[in-house]
Image: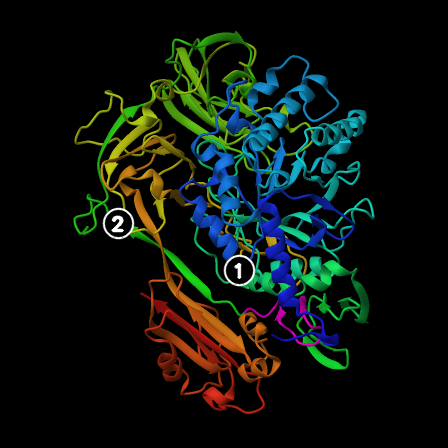
Amino acid sequence: MMRSGGGGMSAVAVALLLVLASTARLCFGANVTYDHRAIVIDGQRRVFISGSIHYARSTPEMWPDLIQKSKDGGLDAIQTYIFWNLHEEVRGQYDFEGRKDVAKFVKLVGEAGLLVHLRIGPYACAEWNYGGFPLWLHFIPGIEFRTDNEPFKAEMKRFTAKIVDLMLGEGLYASQGGPIILSQIENEYGNVQSGYGSGAAPYVKWAASMAVSLGTGVPWVMCQQSDAPDPIINTCNGFYCDQFTPNSNKKPKMWTENWSGWFSSFGDPVPYRPAEDLAFAVARFYQLGGTFQNYYMYQGGSNFGRSSGGPFITTSYDYDAPIDEYGLLRQPKWGHLKDVHKVIKLCEGAMVATDPQTTSLGSNLEATVYKTESGLCAAFLANVDTKSDATVKFNGNSYKLPAWSVSILPDCKNVALNTAKINSVATISKFVRLPSKDDTTASDASISGWSWINEPVGISSDNAFTKFGLLEQISTTADVSDYLWYSSSVEIKGNESKTVLHVDSLGHALHVFINGELAGSGKGSHDNRKVSIDVPISLIPGKTKIDLLSLTVGLQNYGAHYDTEGAGVTGPVQLKGLQNGSTIDLSSQQWTYQIGLKGEELGLSSGSSSLWVSQPTLPKNQPLVWYKTNFDAPAGSSPVALDFTGLGKGQAWINGQSIGRYWPTNTAPKSGCTDSCNYRGSYQPSNCQTNCGEATQQLYHVPRAWLQPSGNVMVLFEEVGGDPTQLSFATKETQSICSRISDTHPVPVELWTSDEETRKKAGPTLLLHCPSPNQVISEIRFASFGTPRGKCGSFSHGPCSSRRALSIVQKACIGLSKCSIGVSVNTFGDPCSGVAKSLAVEASCT
């Protein structure tokens, strides 16, 4: 092992001893505290790298693999929210089974050797329905959420104590030998605190005191809460938190949400965040004194059922996370961050022993050094300029720093990693559509045979009721359903013909039926929930029946007093443009209401009803139809998705399990996306977007655990009309692996434990490895050494290219699960002297 100056123990050895010692102590119970530098376990400061995985956004069968991939990626801890409305849908009735078994999830994390940060809240935000609060809270007399309000505080304390007691009962806090080292109370309250007036500050103090009184034996945090009272640690959330300072010099600098991407909303493009920028943000945070950082999300998962909030948050909560929605590694993001984590850990011994010392190396250039008297030394060199690369002098040596990058030197001498230079393999994945039995060319049959039930238009339930005026939807339905029918009629005398029905709604979507026929629809958006539509209609003498089907698309989850935001048709509802020029206001007349659908009341989502109709003519492109089919599970073990091409909007169930809301006809604007994204400069979701002009979400995750080999039942409720026979299954398959390494890249991080001479001899190295351990590299699709162009999947030769590159790479890699190739003229010859060169390779694995 290489030793640092002064003859002290190597950074690698120190980091390893810290991990082993802390892990051993946690087995028997640990004393978790903190000081100004770090979380402290049994007197030992630690650098922590954490990632968010929400237990309810995947299945228990997926949990072990997600946790292991997190550990393999270099994480020390997993962070998760607790979702109150998931566990206490009915007051006093708790559910911790299946996907809701948070104690099992925490145990699995601990068994894998990782730690846990438990965010109890119980307000979560998280783009989760109603921010995680159960809707029944809304109906408690005199309640006001998240302020100095006795009814709310009583309920919040009761549920918080319930979760703490659950964890204590299972022995899951670190003080008991369990993995939970941190808890969180409230969430991002400081962002909205001003909206709560004089009740806010007392509420913050009460929440802190209440949490501490529960006796977890571990520290509590409040994120985005600059006035968090001692001993609560205030923490930062954001795309960058390097400039964050805690509210006390006795508290460590912690980052509870480093946004690895961003959520997506129906009707909007899908954002992503470049790996280089995310790595830059991480390195800057640790450079400037941070010692706990958490990715939000490390695996985002799926909003099954009606759990998505927003409103308009998609069923996918992929979040461009290092592990994708389906549980596959997103490369090169996962691998590049893994390298960052390894290098940060090489610096841990120096980082926890002292405070950082930062000096300027020039405009937008700085060096930060952690150096101990025993000889440990680690340095970070940063170029925060958004355009210009730079060469800097540090400790007598010269270093090249690309714009918007950080170089990390675990020995204050040699660069182990630069955040802008990715050594990790990249992958290209594709959803491969499977044919159905209706397809005469099908060889792998899947979906076959459809039956249906028509959902009645308007009032069909014995539970309907009549009121004068228009009712707000959420208070009426208590969110037991997305749907609320408003039904009325108007008497026309004389020969009125064409007029306009005007409807104003608080949202989120609306279908207008006139005399049983769909006459028009409207929808809001994530940024503007309200719907205002004018529907041309033809009136006939006598009674005209008006049925309005109002829909929610997930309830609001963020903002001051967000819980008071309404939905539904609040009016006015008017007939405009009558022949005599008058307007009839229908808003205050008598309306009949039905909460939910007849099909929901009958339990059609299970597929077991005797009412299903099977006839040769399947109704297509008609509103309000329930569909059912049987299917065989796609062969293999690859992740499964449903492609909703041909459908409009609705909900879907597999063997009675809801895979969520689908809405493939809600497409993103055609503008706003670019072929490539410049990672240099402060990131915003609008900087880097895909799916412009396309459906925000076309594919929907179907967990393998919900499928049987054959005899599966799928049920759809289609609101606006579609062709279910176009529906197809797809599996997610890796098409290619790629890498592009320049002759100025640092050596792979894996070689850092080698001596300096070995590292110099190895030089920049391109590494390829197949995504699955049972695969080998079967084909080299492209190889070029010189000045290759393009990106993974579209590489091309530049004006300078070695003729030997393809044969050399083939010889080194074909038939192996992984291979390495030195990126230098020694390997490939020199096709053009005096020019900086790269090696670009695309390969396939089988």
Asked if 306 appears above or below 394 in the picture, the reply is: above
Asked if 843 appears above or below 443 in the picture, the reply is: below
The disc, 2 or 1, on the residue closer to the chain's N-terminal end is 1
Residue range of the region highlighted in magenta in the rendering: 403-422
At horizontal 63% and vertical 66% (from top left) the residue drawn is 13
Q: Quadrant of residue 805?
A: bottom left
- From the viewer's perspective, tell me whether residue 400 is left or right of residue 393: left
Say how the picture is coloured.
rainbow
- From the viewer's perspective, tell me whether residue 325 is left or right of residue 564: left
Is residue 391 in sight in this rendering? yes
Q: Which mark is residue 635?
A: 2
Q: Amino acid at mark 2?
A: Ala
Q: Quadrant of the C terminus?
A: bottom left
Is residue 365 in sight in this rendering? no
- The residue where tag 1 is placed is 333
At horizontal 54% and vertical 28% (from top left) the residue drawn is 507
